[in-house]
Image: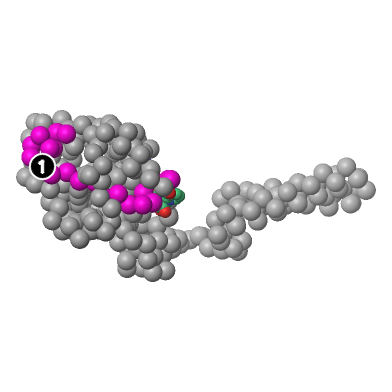
Amino acid sequence: MPVVIALLNAYSGLAACSTGFVLNNNILIIAGSLVGASGIILTNLMCKAMNRSFLNVLFGGFGAVSGEEQEEEDIYGGKVKSTSPEEVAMLISDASKVVIIPGYGMAQARAQHAVRDFTNLLESKNIEVSFAIHPVAGRMPGHMNVLLAEVDIPYEKLKELEEINPRMAEADVAIVLGANDVVNPKARTDVDSPIGGMPIVEADRAKIVVVIKRSLSPGFSGIPNPLFAAGNTLMLFGDAEEMIRKLISAVKKA
Ligand code: NAP
């Protein structure tokens, strides 16, 4: 829609320019050309930023669900199961190994302090907690390490991919906290996707996966995530900090 508006703006400039020629009015010709040219440049820039051709933007979406929407419908349609903090607390109470996989959403929600309190609570109940750290989780190298170090999570609890992936199947519960691309199985299954071939945290191999995020929105790469619709995945929709705090009180009551 913004592309179409920019294009219509450009047309209004071209119309003013043509009127200027008919009326022999230089100001109309100059002003109209400026509006027309800038509108066309803006339209072109917006198409480039969307990585789509001009004709595709104009005619691609009319009367049909776009390819991306269709793909989301195929992956998620009727398969996503949402859960509550109380249900997750019951699952955690029966667990002996929990792996937390933090991502950009933990940073966005500033949930690291709640995560530290949650970790301490689980350990007081003799539940082993470790953190799976993906090298590009978040928005800068070492982002997760910095946040977890800030709240004194011991360094030995932070596990790199090579160490955690072979042991992921032993995890009773994997908690994906505001991460998306770094746990997306499409990296393994779809080499043509933007993350094709990227090593991931293999959260899907855990017995139960709990994903904490606010919606089914994609992450940085902009693609849907089949993990959210997997048979062993439960979605806990909400802000990362708020949900971890709710989990803390639910685990205390469980
Ligand atoms: P991601 O794929 O960008 O996904 C982050 C998820 O966090 C989103 O899907 C979002 O879902 C959720 N989120 C945002 N705010 C939240 C909140 N307040 N509470 C709960 N969830 C929240 O993040 P990632 O898995 O960490 O992957 C990082 C991506 O960034 C990779 O694609 C990587 O290549 C790229 N990248 C990394 C670096 C680096 O150096 N680390 C640099 C540039 C780019 P909702 O909106 O549904 O909540």
How many C-alpha atoms fall within 10 Å of the one at disc 1: few (<14), some, or many (≥20)?
some
Total tally of numbered discs in the picture: 1
Q: Is residue 17 left or right of residue 53?
A: right
The stretch of residues the image draws in magenta is: 120-140
Q: Is residue 48 left or right of residue 72?
A: right
In front of the other: 40 or 207: 207
Residue at image point 10% right, 42% down: 127
In the image, is residue 134 part of the stretch drawn in magenta?
Answer: yes
Location of the C terminus (image quadrant): top left
Residue at image point 34% right, 43% down: 144
Q: Where, by quadrant of the figure, is residue 77 drawn?
A: bottom left
Find the residue positioned furthest to the right.
24
In front of the other: 6 or 169: 169
Residue 87 seen anywhere in this rendered image of the structure = no
Q: Position of residue 118 (x, y in %)?
A: 19, 35
- What colour-coding does the image apply? one colour
In front of the other: 160 or 118: 160
**254 versus 10 height, above or below:** above
Q: Where, by quadrant of the figure, is residue 248 drawn?
A: top left
Residue 80 seen anywhere in this rendered image of the structure = yes
Q: Is residue 31 left or right of residue 127?
A: right
Residue holding disc 1? 127
Q: Position of residue 44 (x, y in %)?
A: 65, 56
In the image, is residue 45 part of the stretch drawn in magenta?
Answer: no
Q: Is residue 92 left or right of residue 243?
A: left
For label 1, the SS is loop
Residue at image point 72% right, 52% down: 11
Q: Where, by quadrant of the figure, is residue 105 drawn?
A: top left
